[in-house]
Amino acid sequence: MLAVSMVHSPAHAAAPKKDRKYYESRGEVIWEVRTSEKVIALTFDDGPHPRYTAQILDLLKQYNAKGTFFVVGNKVKLHPELVKRTAAEGHEVANHTYSHAYLNKKTNIKKEITKAEDTIVAAIGRRTHLFRPPGGIYNDKLVQTAKQEGYKVVLWSWHQDTQDWKAPGVNKIVDKVLGHTRNGDIILFHDFIEGPTHTIDALKIILPELKQRGYTFVTVSELLTHAK
């Protein structure tokens, strides 16, 4: 009688857990960058806003800071001149879907990304290569779709979610950022907020203080070049 082998083939091995460690090790999703250099990336989601975006751009110029703006396609369509200004002043424009749709299994992820990209290209004449899903919600289908379309998925440092979209007060935003800043951080702000914003007044404190501490503000793409 032939012995029956109980050895499992590699095909039956447990599938890897697709968590932050999995995607981070493959370079498919970025939360922050490990670096010994004092560089950080300021990111702004959900814009452009007809008033707030321009005020943020003014502040960034004042402190010689570069930022990355994850724009929403339907707002780009309404305010292309702000996106043109953003790019012209050396900031990075990145994709944040067309309608700020939360990308679940029922959402046409590819359509949301490519439709937003069309509006970006129409505004600035070139495409972007970074994508941030609304709410920071991601899954394997989203990551792989973004990758196939030529994007790197960028989230943010978990200790640098300012929650400024809630308008929590200037001091809370300032304390969150200044109390936790590390080399290689990706800090999350919003330039589009429905209602009053505390972000701009917070930036008036954050920018000079971090500059005094010796930090340089770079785009996300520039930050990636500083990785160890």
Image (tube, grey):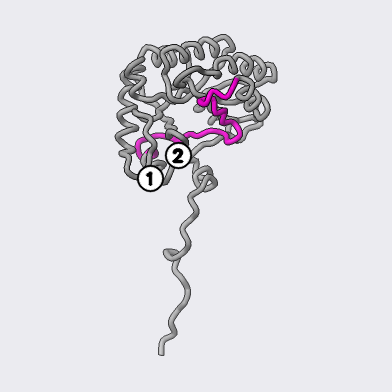
Kind of residue at badge 2 = Ile
| Whole-number angstrom distance, CA of label 1 to CA of label 2 | 11 Å
**At 60% across and 13% down in the image, what residue appears?**
204
Q: Residue 42's quadrant in the figure?
A: top right
Compared with 46, 143 (above or below) is: below
Q: Secondary structure at mark 2?
A: loop
The total number of labels drawn is: 2
User: Split into 4 quadrants, where in the image is the C terminus?
Assistant: top right
Q: Position of residue 172 (x, y in %)?
A: 62, 24
Q: Is residue 222 visible?
A: no
Mark carried by residue 141 = 1
User: Split into 4 quadrants, where in the image is the N terminus?
Assistant: bottom left
Q: Is residue 227 left or right of residue 53?
A: right
Residue 81 or residue 24, whichever sits in front: 81
Read off the residue under disc 2: 137
Kind of residue at badge 1 = Lys
Residue 180 or residue 8, whichever sits in front: 180
Start-end of magenta stretch: 146-169
Q: Position of residue 123 (x, y in %)?
A: 34, 17
Q: Is residue 212 left or right of residue 199?
A: right
Q: Is residue 161 magenta?
A: yes
* Marks 1 and 2 close (CB-CB < 8 Å): no
Q: Residue furthest right?
A: 213
Q: Residue 76's quadrant in the figure?
A: top left
**At 51% across and 36% down in the image, what residue appears?**
30
